[in-house]
Amino acid sequence: MNILVCVKRVPATGSKIVLTADSQEIDTRYLGFTISPHEECAVEEAVRLVEAHGGSSTVLTLGPEAASEQLRDAMALGIDSGILLETDGRDWDGGATAAAIVETVRQREAAGQPFDLILFGNESADSGGFQVGIRVAHALDRPCITGIKELKLAADRRVGGQLTAAREAGGGREIYQLGLPAVVTVKEGLNLPRYPSLPGRLKAKKKPLERIQPRWPGNTLEKIRLKLPSEAAHQVDVLGHGPAAAARAVEVFRTLGIMEK
């Protein structure tokens, strides 16, 4: 079982996002970075599958040299090796990103190192495009299941292995079975990701990290500008100060139905 996990370097969840003056980029001077919660579960699932069935696991990301930090974090959790598709910092849309991943997978296949299973997070925490995993599966002509919250692998010599995957749907669950190789996008809640240990971090520094400069195919979407969502307005009414506010507080409680008249 050879598993590839694709992740993306994104601003730390919960960070205050500030745009540059021209509204073209996110001001990253004071931001921390991580991978998306869905992708954390994809990394954990790859480690668990290899622990249970044997094989190897690889984590891949497309981004600047700084993104190697996220690859090392994944390797500290148990991933065996990493691939950095190193870019010059320009934006790569979903189509361009998928094309770079597909080219890398095909190069591995040509070298006799195919991936049986490719895992993605269901969507990234920043752009939320929901499309890279599907594009990769389509280009490689592999079956794809999205939004998965349960994944099991059963040995089957006829197909090299068989996946059983489940996702939530309409108050129930949809169950799928498919043979390998395959592409799966997973959601947060699939598992409980482990924390990296100190020995794991030390081992991660010694694990192989391949750097590839992918060919930029060009974006099919044009970015006009970024726009922050409107913040919800909050209004505070000061009822008064000290004992003088008691009568007003009682009036508010009665209006809300908390206190009877």
Image (cartoon, rainbow, N blue to C red):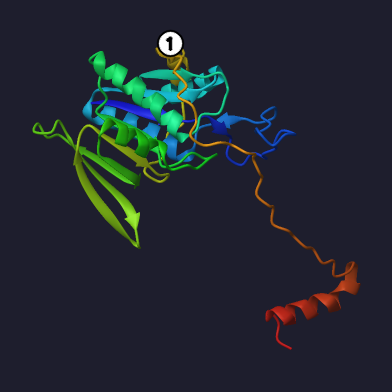
Where residue 222 sits: x, y (%)?
Answer: 56, 36
Q: Amino acid at mark 1?
A: Lys
Where residue 220 sits: x, y (%)?
Answer: 48, 34
* Residue 226 placement, left or right of 144: right
In this rendering, the count of numbered labels is: 1
Q: Residue at x 55, y 33 (%)?
A: 10
Where residue 126 sits: x, y (%)?
Answer: 55, 39
Q: Residue at x 43, y 36 (%)?
A: 39
Q: Residue at x 73, y 81 (%)?
A: 255
* Residue 83 placement, left or right of 70: left
Residue 242, above or below 180: below
* Residue 240 placement, left or right of 175: right
Where residue 179 sits: x, y (%)?
Answer: 18, 37
The residue tagged 1 is 206
Q: Quadrant of residue 79 in the image?
A: top left
Q: Can residue 197 be seen from the camera position used here?
A: no
Position of the N terminus, as image quadrant, is top left
| Residue nearest the viewer, comparing 228 with 248 | 228
Q: Can residue 162 be seen from the camera position used here?
A: yes
Residue 173, above or below 123: below
Name, please, the residue furthest toward the bottom. Answer: 261
